[in-house]
Amino acid sequence: MKKYFLNTFIVAALLTAATSCGDNFGTMNISPNSPSNPNTASILTGALRNVGATVTGIQPGLYVQHFGDVTYIEESRYKTVNFDYNGFYAGPLMNLQFIIQQNTDAATKSNAAATGSNANQIATARILKAYFFQFLTDRWGDIAYSQALKASENFSPKFDKQQDIYNDLFKEWKEAAAQFDGGKTVQGDILLSGNVARWKKFANSLRALAALRLSKVDPAKGKTEFAAAVADGLLASNADNVKYGYLSEANNEHPLYNNYITTNRKDFAVSSTFVDYLTKVGDPRLPAMADKNINGVYRGVPYGVFPPTWKAQDVSLAATTMRQQNSPVNVMTYAQVLFAQAEAAQLGWISGNAQTFYEAGIKASMEQWGSYTAEAYAKYIAQADVAFTSDKAIEQISTQRWIALFYQNSEAWAEWRRTGFPVLKPAEKPLNGGTDIPRRMAYPTTAPTLNKTNYDAVVGSQGADNQYTRVWWDKK
């Protein structure tokens, strides 16, 4: 959590004006570390540094059985119930709200425009703010939204219903994409380098993926929003893939590199569920996702089995090629968007052939992982478990999405919860008092103490604050 507190400190410093005892002292009491004209480019960079954490947090990857524990068989048995989101509110969300305020306020917008046109900065911040809020609501369900980010104006915000949050997210992404102008390029953008066309595709694709979340709970709304997002333009090739790039330095290194190399812990390996399925179907992506063990074979770590009878060298760790210190992580991919269109076509939400989208998604995923050859692809999609059949279309699309989303942990967990595919067996003897795979994360332990009235209200409306109360879109 160090980076969140650092970001909060930076914002606090920027918002604190240097004061003096009198004019006679001139600039003597003005701190050079508390500038009166904050650099919104640096603040944007600070917010963007949290994007990697939304992708790589390991718990959802354990829930969907991409990964399993190697030594301490606890997290794959769901031991942790309460998860903290306070850092996201105090860090990137507050930073992004500050960028919007600086570029909106008449007293500050002229200075803020030095690092990008006001409209471009606001649009970028709105897209990202909605991205972080979707990440939070997909994990916890009802969360503070409409009354959040008001600092001292409201330290006890209400929890908005997820349905209301989603409705506003659609609006935010659509309006933000339309808000970009032809002005100065946004500086400090370490995600898409201020490329307006890419930001628009990202926003539109976020709308489409969010619309698909509504497939069971509000299909009419989902269909309308999905079709509108497609019309506005989605990711169109692997060149459009959105990736967060880690660096070759300890303060911003790939989490798996940190776990495997820096700390030499090797806590997590690719799970037997995942390795066994990819082996069964002869998936050419397996070598790009997992290493062979010490005996030269692919062996997934037994999932949720206690006590362990293996060591790290006995099982397949995540592939060396994907967990270098500066390896990027996928935030959103063309394959992911194609599978969404395949499902939408199968549901009758958009025109087009579901099989065509499905097979294109497999091809794009293979290309993305560096595993594509025409021969391997043709052989793969022809086999019984993969060849498209309309009767099993949703299951097949969902299973291929599950493979393609390897190490996009939160997104993989959300899509598994929504579709139920692939069918996964829960861990043996869960440690959280339950018997199934978690459907949500429980609120931080600070929620009932720091915001008791609103916490009690949300528990009363949403349901028990545990890992099995389903979020709004997770309908049986």
Image (cartoon, rainbow, N blue to C red):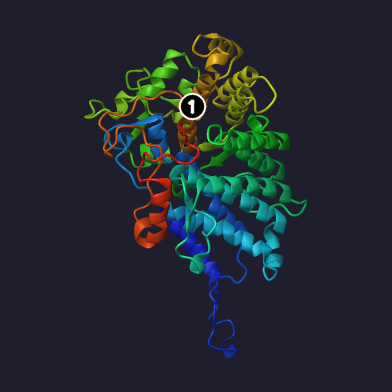
| In the rendered image, the vertical position of residue 52 relative to residue 363, given as above or below | below
Residue 270 lies in quadrant: top left
What residue do we see at 70% from left, 69% from top?
Answer: 106
Q: Secondary structure at mark 1?
A: helix
Asked if 100 appears above or below 397 in the picture, the reply is: below
Q: Quadrant of residue 365?
A: top right
The image quadrant that residue 300 belongs to is top left
Residue 286, x across and y down, in percent: 46, 21
- Whole-percent x, y for residue 362 in the image: 57, 21
Front residue of 346/321: it is 346
Near-viewer residue (352 or 307):
352
**For residue 46, side relative to residue 69 (left or right):** right
- Spot the residue most to the right: 182
Residue under label 1, please give it: 402
Q: Provide residue 15's location: percent of width, then percent of height.
A: 55, 69
Residue 75 in sight here:
yes
Q: Is residue 248 visible?
A: no
Q: Give the total of numbered labels.
A: 1
In the figure, is residue 411 to the left or right of 203? left
Percent across and percent down for residue 226 are 65, 35
Dot 1, crowdedness within 10 Å: few (<14), some or many (≥20)?
A: many
- Taking the spot 57% from the left edge, 51% from the top edge, the residue there is 129
What is the quadrant of the C terminus in the image?
A: top left
Q: Which amino acid is tagged 1? A: Trp
In the orientation shown, which residue stands out farthest toward the front?
460
